[in-house]
């Protein structure tokens, strides 16, 4: 059981890095974000990071042959989603000519869901890694991954808010660049 917890903690930290970067970008984009909104954003990422490995586990135990066909498209989907969101943030930040305001669109629930999917889609493959585990062990792993993601994303949001307040209007451009870079990293790393 100890080995399972240590493995899940490692997986949680590794999987949460994309969500951390997106949280950082969200904090940069919205430096006056309140605590309940931060919890909603971090919680969304945490839920997706916990659900995706379980979805992968279920796929291994049920419809693996169908999932393998789609697996090669996952990095392209994640890159496209993060590229779109990041590009929009860059556009909004460049379009904004003020230094004090929060320009551009506020993060909507729909965009948050897209971010959650894009940053957790690689967690589907963790379902393959935990496929040998029982359902209870897989659920424990998913909960640990989710809690790790929640904590790491809250840290990202706090850091983003801190630096977003200092850089004001242009923080959105920097946040958008981070998202585009993450999307490209996911795509490029899929080839190696």
Image (tube, rainbow, N blue to C red):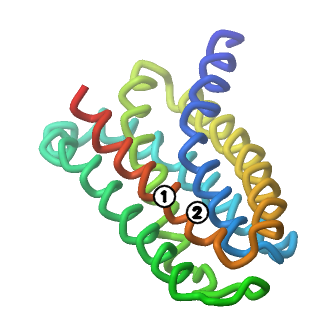
Residue 179 is marked as 1
Instruction: Tell me where residue 166 sits by quadrant.
Output: bottom right
Instruction: Tell me where residue 129 sits by quadrant.
Output: top left
Would you name the residue on which mark 2 appears? Answer: 175
Could you say which is closer to the camera, residue 58 or residue 145? 145
Residue placed farthest to the right in the image? 35
Instruction: Tell me where residue 40 sits by quadrant.
Output: bottom right
Question: Horizontal and vertical percent for residue 34?
Answer: 86, 75
| Label 1 secondary element | helix
Q: Are marks 1 and 2 in contact (CB under 8 Å)?
A: yes
Residue 87 in the image: above or below residue 47: below
- Residue 117 is left or right of residue 6, and the answer is left
Q: Dot 1: few (<14), some (14–19), or many (≥20) neighbours within 10 Å?
A: many
Residue 53 is marked as none
Question: Horizontal and vertical percent for residue 65?
Answer: 14, 38
Residue 94 in the image: above or below residue 60: below
- Residue 186 is left or right of residue 52, and the answer is left
Q: CA distance from mark 1 to mark 2?
A: 6 Å
Question: Horizontal and vertical percent for residue 162?
Answer: 84, 60
- Residue 58 is left or right of residue 41, and the answer is left
Could you say which is closer to the camera, residue 113 or residue 135? 113
**Residue drawn at the location 20% of the way across and 49% of the way down:** 73
Question: Horizontal and vertical percent for residue 136?
Answer: 58, 30
Q: Please identify the quadrant where the N terminus is shown.
A: top right
**Number of numbered discs:** 2
Could you say which is closer to the camera, residue 124 or residue 96? 96
């Amino acid at each position: 059981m100890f080995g399972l917890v240590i493995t899940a903690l490692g997986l949680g930290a590794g999987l949460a890095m994309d969500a951390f970067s997106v949280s950082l970008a969200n904090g940069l984009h919205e430096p006056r974000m309140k605590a309940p909104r931060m919890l909603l954003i971090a919680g969304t990422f945490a839920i997706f990071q916990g659900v995706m490995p379980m979805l992968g586990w279920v796929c291994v135990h049920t419809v693996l042959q169908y999932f393998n066909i789609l697996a090669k498209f996952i990095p392209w989907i994640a890159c496209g989603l993060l590229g779109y969101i990041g590009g929009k943030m860059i556009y909004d930040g460049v379009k904004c000519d003020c230094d004090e305001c929060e320009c551009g669109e506020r993060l909507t629930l729909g965009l948050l869901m897209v971010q959650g999917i894009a940053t957790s889609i690689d967690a589907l493959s963790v379902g393959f890694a935990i496929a040998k585990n029982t359902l209870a062990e897989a659920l424990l792993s998913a909960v640990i991954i989710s809690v790790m993601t929640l904590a790491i994303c809250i840290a990202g949001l706090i850091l983003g808010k801190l630096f977003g307040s200092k850089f004001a209007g242009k923080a959105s451009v920097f946040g958008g660049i981070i998202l585009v870079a993450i999307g490209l990293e996911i795509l490029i790393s899929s080839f190696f």
